[in-house]
Image: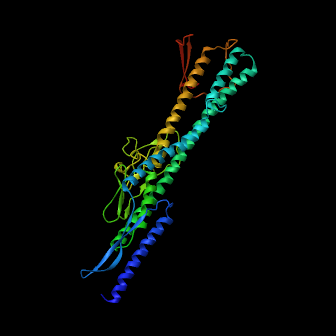
Amino acid sequence: MSLELTLKDALSGLQTSQAALQSISNNIANANTEGYSRKQVSPKSLVIGGKGFGVSVGEVRRSVDEGILNLLRNETSETRKLEQQDTFLSQINKFFGRPEDNSSITHKIADFASQFDALAVSPEVEASQFLAVNSGADVLRNLESLSDEIQRLRNTANNDINTTVTEFNLLVETIAKINGQIVQFENSNLDGSELKDQRDRSLNSLAEIVDIKYFDDGTGAVNVFAGTGQTLVNGGAGLKISYASPSLIVSRSEYTPKTATNYIGPGSSGHPVGGIPGIFVGEEAPNTDITTGISSGRLKGLVDIRDFELPMLQSQLDELAEKLKVEINAVHNKGAGAPAVFGFTGDRYVQAGTRFEGTGQVRIGIVDDNGTLRGLRKSGLSETS
């Protein structure tokens, strides 16, 4: 072996050791860096003509347990869903208040009942009359305010869905782009480990939004699928999701899939008035709608809040208002005016000869103490007089 080859052999050893030391230095420096994986340099013997001529840097391996990483992403996705729901439910819980709070609907209904009890004892006292009416109006205002808050939060959740869809698409685009770069690096025998760390961080962020499945296709690229099975990333190509967000969510608004009987087909929105469109992967079609198929992630939490949790709360509030109305009317109907009224005089004056035109029917009934109808008089309004 010539002196030159001997020196090159020694130099290759020094260069390889330097690369290994650089890798160790990076590992130490990034020990607390989120998303960084420890790297390990594997030396590779140089062989020329069957003889060894030094050493070179071989594969740079990342110390990553893919099984644990996949489990972490699944658990993170579920956690983000629950955190998203907790954020909204905590807001509405503060608005409803605790039962013992003076501003809570529970306290206002109890106060309303107390004022009616006081009115029953002294119905002729104007102060009792005023307090009873005022407390009733206070209950109504509180019910309206709670309903408005529920719809406000539904609109906030819907706006967040729109924003999250945009964030999701950027991540899909990023992963597809990095896939292409990694494939090029590996085909050129270059180190793509840092790019893989970057891709892992994007996959972590994607898993926070929806539940995903993925696998390495053998070329260095990772193919990603939605939990419902639709392809999101295939090599260097990404498929975006779309959501045509309605401008306003109202109490009657509900998710309307393309397969629904009241779906009206192509048009300005493709959905009936009050309908909320789905979230689609790629082209809009029944089999690309993932709205109800998402099982975890922030997007799932937002959809559940908008379409299930808050509407259910609104339904309970409506039921409370309906029962309150029925009970108040039942109590009111048991009473009677004192002194009894023998006639009614209208306060709307019309000129003589004015013709009345109307349609409909007025029904006046008489019931006994048990609420049984004893007499009924009908008067038609369809005549012109």
Relative to 298, is 343 above or below?
Answer: above
As rendered, which of 13 and 372 lies closer to the eye?
Answer: 13
Q: Which residue is pictured at 57% across the width and 10% down the height?
A: 369
Relative to 90, is 170 above or below?
Answer: below
Relative to 261, is 324 above or below?
Answer: above
Q: Is residue 35 found left or right of 223 in the rendered image? A: right
Quadrant of the rendering where the C terminus is positioned: top right
Relative to 297, is 106 above or below?
Answer: above
To which quarter of the image does residue 348 belong? top right
The spot of residue 293 in percent (x, y) is: 38, 46
As rendered, which of 271 and 91 lies closer to the eye?
Answer: 91
To which quarter of the image does residue 95 belong? top right
The spot of residue 358 in percent (x, y) is: 56, 28
To which quarter of the image does residue 143 belong? top right
Quadrant of the rendering where the N terminus is positioned: bottom left
Q: Which residue is pictured at 37% across the width and 71% down the height?
A: 185
Is residue 350 shown to the viewer in this render?
A: no
Q: Which residue is pictured at 41% across the width and 78% down the height?
A: 15
Q: Residue furthest left?
A: 50
Q: Which residue is pictured at 24% across the width and 80% down the height?
A: 50
